[in-house]
Amino acid sequence: MSHAISKNHNGNGASPRSLFVENLEKAYTKGNLILKGLTFEVHGETTVGIIGPSGTGKSTLLRCINRLIEPTSGKIIVAGQDITSLSGTRLRLARRHIGMVFQEFNLVERLSVIENVLCGRLGYLPSWRAWLRKFPQEDINQAFKLIDQVGLGEFATQRADSLSGGQRQRVGIARAMMQNPDVIMADEPTSSLDPKTSVEIMELLKQVSATQHIPVLINIHDVNLAQRFCDRIIGMSQGHIVFDGPPSELSPEHLKQIYGGEDWLA
Amino acid sequence: MTTRTETRTPFKPNWAARLGWLGVLAYCVYAGMSLDFTWSRFIDGLANGAKFLGEMIPPNFERWRLLISNLVETVEIAVIASAFGIAASLPIGLCGARNLMPEWMTWPSRTFIAICRSFHPVIFAILFVKAVGFGPLAGILTLIFLTIGFIGKLFCEAIEEISLKPVEAIKAAGAPFMSVLVFGVLPQVFNRFIGFATYQFDANLRNSTMVGIVGAGGIGGTLFAAFQRFDYDFLAAILIAIIALIMVSEYISLKIKAIFND
């Protein structure tokens, strides 16, 4: 990361880029726990694939980490800062250090690629400058650099709605990197993409983790893809973590435990 | 072949709807009779109309100075009212959007919009003439409220229809609320808002020719006076001027939309 970016990085960047989740619980309705006491920690350069059946709370887990969804209880510590105790402006400032990549890309369709990537910088910019679209030149340079890095150099000024799915997800990843985050969370980043593009996106996420030395958490349905690209797999079932280890240790027995049944494994 | 096959129709007869149409038709006949709307009256009316039209031709542009100054005032009323009305509609419409704002903010704003919408401009104009006296100020206030009622509601609905996905992403990046608005919300509604605004400016121009009838400034006052004095040739001149004005504004709003459309 450039010096210019880290200059704006208020404190968190100094401590190791890590994520602790301790005894995290979430109930949407009282007494009905979706997440039942999750505990794990991730340090530095790691890609973590979170697998599990639909409705088991994978998306809820990621959204609890940046508190787009309020956790019911438990502790979340990103780069040394306790996220769960924050509110208002301090929560907003903490969110800047948590990048997020979405299944449906969540780009502003009518804005250009460069504008979408700069959106990742809005947390660092006073609102009046956002209204005047006056981003610091170093942010603009950084945005162009990231767009080149994700391979979209020639599309920088094209509108997001003119891009293909894979290209849009690259914009989404560049936007998350623009935050100079301590951790990136990707919620089903490949589920809207074809198999070839999915592989490219997973490669890119792995590369981001390596170059930024940050943990990248990836919710993913494709177990093979997860095993191929992730350093670590967390298997969730019915709100519990039932597997946590390297992909090589993930056995059919585990998969049976995670997804239930066994016919699909044949 | 002698087997009888039953005809199957894909469309079910809807007897309730048929009865409904019949009912509407019957009511129209009944209402027409009770309002003494008869053929002979229509024929008599035609003769009257022909006489009226005859007196309108040729239009009399002798008092063109008055006409021009009235037109200028009409345009001024419309422009000022549109500018202030649209500017006010933005925050009011935003505050009413239930997908972005908390309930304690949406209901006052939605109530205000509903009140603005509940009266016809003529009623507003009469109220404001009573409140601030004869003249263009009453007309301007009338059209401002009219604009808020219309644009505020449309804008509010446009915001409620946006995709919240980019909003979620920008929020997740830690952007302050006002920045979320300018990058996540505004780009999604800007085009439609330009459309609403130009449409409303058109409507305001038309309405500003009317508010004068109740004394709220603009060309409407002169129009009404010409009517009352049976000054039909001058009346024709006024009507032609209004048509020309509206056509010019149609052209301008087309141009404005073309600039912002992409």
Image (cartoon, coloured by chain):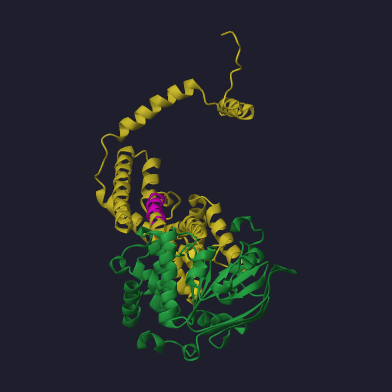
Q: Residue B136, can we see it?
A: no
Q: Residue B239: image x %, image y %?
A: 33, 42
Up-down relation of residue A147 to residue A15 (above or below): above
The tint of chain B in the picture is yellow
Residue A249: quarter of image: bottom right
Along the line of sight, the residue nearer the viewer: B191 or A121: A121
Up-down relation of residue A197 to residue A44 (above or below): above
Q: Decide if residue B54 is on the left or right side of residue B177.
A: left
Q: Residue A236, can we see it?
A: yes
Q: Which residues are magenta?
A: B196-208
Residue B46: quarter of image: top left
The tint of chain A in the picture is green
Along the line of sight, the residue nearer the viewer: B62 or B72: B72
Q: Decide if residue B250 is on the left or right side of residue A214.
A: left
Q: Main secondary structure of the magenta part?
A: helix
Along the line of sight, the residue nearer the viewer: A3 or B24: A3
The residue depicted at 30 percent of the width and 65 percent of the height is A155
Q: Residue B93: image x %, image y %?
A: 50, 62
Residue B211 falls within the magenta-colored stretch: no
Residue B198 falls within the magenta-colored stretch: yes
The residue depicted at 49 percent of the width and 84 percent of the height is A44
Q: Residue B87: image x %, image y %?
A: 43, 65
Q: Decide if residue B41 is on the left or right side of residue B27.
A: left
Up-down relation of residue A83 to residue A186 (above or below): below
Q: Specify the quadrant that holds the C terminus of chain A.
A: bottom right
